[in-house]
Amino acid sequence: MTSREPARHMTQGAKTRFAILALQRTGTNMLGSILRKTGKVHMYGEVFYPDLGTGDLAQDLANGLFFPFWRDRIARDPRQLMLSDPTIYDAVLADFLDRLFTQVEPGIVGIDIKSEQIEAFPRLFHLMRQGEVRVIHLERRNYLARIVSQLVLNHRMRAGDADVHRSVAKVPPLTIDPVTILDWMRDDAARNRMFHDNFAGLPDRYLHVFYEDIATDGTALRKVFDFLGLADEPIPPPDTVKQVPSDFAGQIANYAEVAAALAGAGHGGFLRPA
């Protein structure tokens, strides 16, 4: 088997295959819920999230989980562990993606992939390009809002908070290191450039949209629907609510320090929540 064979295998079938590429806390759940409600889209969650599953391989594959699939492959052939070999790497990932895209009935099938998962499996870019996977690059225009949302989630997880849908206003103000914020913003920009640079050369298969527009503007959602071949479908309401800090000054305990650092770095515009 050559490294090209799995990529050719991925092109088989008539389904529209797409991936939502985004950073964490960028609205993929909102967009996914809207697409699912059309009844025309099967939308998996984060297929490369490190979840070992239930122990039932058929159920784990139905849920779109890579790691139980990979564990089963390794148990049957230990060489499958060697993702440093591009032939094995491509074969394992392409087989998994092909199963996801062909095991369900709707003609449009999507997966959710976050930036750190792409960094763990960088050959995914190659396989998606070769496998004719469409890409929706979902970006949050306000990087500070994304970072605060992530920090709030981290705070809840550390506290064992089961109610992750509470308003961010109900979480105590957080103290944030301004240097860390600026580093994360640079990382956010670099990861979004990574998505763009890998797919923007395929204009018919790449769509870049902002979370803030998806959450507030029907025009942006209509572009997504058109991109996926759903031009005649009405747009249903989402199952999730927009989670954006409404008051950074009330959410960040050392707001004055953070605001000064952002303004000094030319990022003062991010201090206005969307």
Image: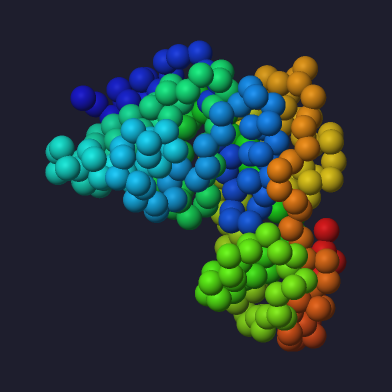
Q: Which residue is found at the position 68% from the left and 69% from the top?
A: 148
Q: Which residue is found at the position 77% from the left and 17% from the top?
A: 232
In this rendering, the answer to whether 102 lies above or below 274 is above
Q: Of all residues shown, which one is farthest toward the top?
A: 14
Give the camera-side residue of 202 and 215.
215
Q: In the figure, is residue 68 to the left or right of 43? A: left
In this rendering, the answer to whether 129 lies above or below 215 is above
Residue 227: quadrant of the picture: top right
Q: Where is residue 257 in the image (x, y as percent from the top left)?
A: 75, 86
Q: Which residue is found at the position 30% from the left and 45% from the top?
A: 55
Res 262 seen here: no
Q: In the figure, is residue 133 to the left or right of 170? A: left
Q: Quadrant of the N terminus?
A: top left
Q: Quadrant of the C terminus?
A: bottom right
In this rendering, the answer to whether 195 lies above or below 149 is above
Q: Which residue is found at the position 21% from the left and 46% from the top?
A: 81
Q: Position of residue 151 (x, y in %)?
A: 62, 70
- Numbered-mark total: 0
In this rendering, the answer to whether 235 lies above or below 230 is below
Q: In the figure, is residue 142 to the left or right of 178? A: right
Q: Position of residue 223 (x, y in %)?
A: 76, 30
Res 43 seen here: yes
